[in-house]
Structures are given as C-alpha cells and as structure tokens.
Amino acid sequence: MAATVNVYHYDAFSTIPNQGNPAGVVLDGGHWTEQQMLAIAGKVGFNETAFPMPSDVADLRIRFFTPGHEINLCGHATMATIYALATRGLLGERTELTIETLAGVLPIQLCRGVANELRIRMKQADPQFQPFHGSVAELAQSIGIVESDIAAHLPTVYGSTGTWTLIVPVTSLAAFERMKPDNARFPAVLQEMPRSSVHPFCLETYDSAAHMHARHFSSPYSGTIEDPVTGTASGVMGAYFAQHIRSEPVLKLVVEQGQEIGRDGRVEVTVTNGTEVEITGTAVYVGEFEVQI
C-alpha cells in the first residue's frame, strides 16, 4: 500500500532560495523504516534527505540518506534540519543541543547573525586522514582536468570529519571551470576507498572574503553527481588547511562553493588546535512537497 510523505525543502549555506545546497527534511523521521527512508530519498532526488527522530543518547537523532545509501554525517542536511526545527518552534528557546549521528554524538549551537539570521554552529567528528596511493593522472582525468592542474606541492589525501572524501589540491580557478566528473570511474581510481567522494579545492577564490574554493563530486554509489555546497567536506578541508597550509591556535576560514553550477554558498570553518573542527552556516525555507512510496 502506497504511503504519502511530506518533505520540506531547505537550502543550506545560503539565505537566498535556490542557492546553496538543497536538502529534504522529513520531520516525522521516526515513522519510517530504513528501507522506506532510502525510498523517500530516492524519490526526493536531492544529494541528501534528513530524517530527525527521537534519541536515547542525545537531544535528537538525525539519519541522512542519499538516493543510493545512508551516510554517517551530512553538514548541509544538519543545517537544514536544525533550521527547520528551530523556525517551526520545535526546539523552544533552546540554543544548545546534541545530535546523535552515525559519526557520533555532536553538539549544536544556535545564535543570531548581524542581520538577525539564524546561525547554526556544528561540531564535527575528529579529523582523520589516509594517504592516496593511486594515479594522479587518472584522478585528474576522472574529473575532467589534466595532471598539471593538481598541485604537486600539497598532498592529495583522503580526509574525514564524519564522511570520507578525497581532498585534491588544484592550482587555479580556471581548472574548476573545465571540470566534468566521470563519477563511474571513481571506484577504480580510489582503490583504497572506492566509495569515497572527490573534493577538489584551490586557494584562488571568486570572493575576496573567502579563503578556499571547492567543488564536491559524489561517489557513484550515492546516486548523485555533484554536491553544491558541502559542510562535512568543508570541515575536513579546514583541518587539512591547518595541517598543510597555515596553522594557528584558532583558525577561521570561509569556504565558497557552488559557483560553477549556479548554487553559490558559504561555509564558515573554525579549527582549534588543528583538530577540533566546527562549521557555521544558515539555511532558508524553499517549499514543501509530497512523495509517494
């Protein structure tokens, strides 16, 4: 028997609808089975759909699904979910809470920005890095650039603050305009972590207030091609910056992403002592719709 699911569409890391990164939020997440959640995410079609539900170990549990599988943690869908709950009065006057995820129990803080916009600060899991031993030439080809576009003076490594991605240092913004990912090739190139996504970045930016520019190409197992503005990848990219580019006791960075695909967004990243990673952002309500499963 078919079921009707109400899905709320929010765009994270932007205050402008149809910019930033779209996420689906299913407010009655505890009502659905894992198989149903995966089916809902497939019908929604966004890079991630979030399902908030009660938790025995935190204030809230959130499960995150791509159209292809469940993932441990999603920064932009967390922003969308917390924004949805807060603006709908479902968090009361609370400004601090914890969320249970497959990456652990993580603290969330809410505050107001200079324009009175709701800002959400999210701690991520401790950063981890693993070496990439594959072919840089094949990696470059898989995202539509050439080997010389990948910076040789910085390491290409797998990184995670909750979800694994391959961090790829790129020499210039011009290379980003040429990128055309062939996601189906990723598992063969990423032999150490064939289910990883690919996250190229550079230090040249469109916005003079930003410190890093990035794109994020999905694992083919996720059922999507590109994630417009990524929270978890921005977080681990901040830890990478602290380790390989510039280290400060408290490092504050702005990451820009999404410009090449018309989804301009910003993620603020704070790295304390090189290992404690937090991201800050906001979201905006776009609309709601129903899917049938």
Image (cartoon, helix red, strand yellow):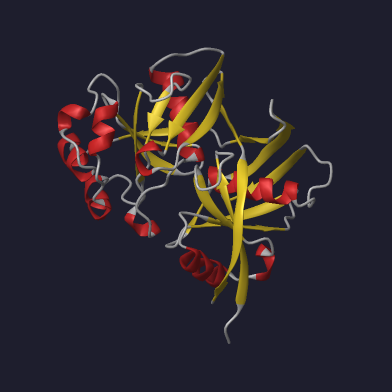
- Number of numbered markers: 0
Q: Looking at this view, is 272 or 67 the one in front? A: 67
Q: Looking at this view, is 32 or 17 the one in front? A: 17
Residue 133 visible from this viewpoint: no
Kindly identify the residue that appears in the image at 25 percent across and 40 percent down: 179
Residue 237, how many percent across, how many down? 43, 30
Kindly identify the residue that appears in the image at 45 percent across and 31 percent down: 256
Quarter of the image with the C terminus is: bottom right
- Please determine whether, in this image, residue 153 is positioned above or below residue 229: above
- Please determine whether, in this image, residue 109 is positioned above or below residue 270: below
Drawn side of residue 238 relative to residue 97, left or right: left
Quarter of the image with the N terminus is: bottom right
Residue 104, how many percent across, how many down? 61, 45
Q: Residue furthest bottom?
A: 1
Residue 246, how many percent across, how many down? 43, 14
Residue 128, how many percent across, how many down? 45, 34
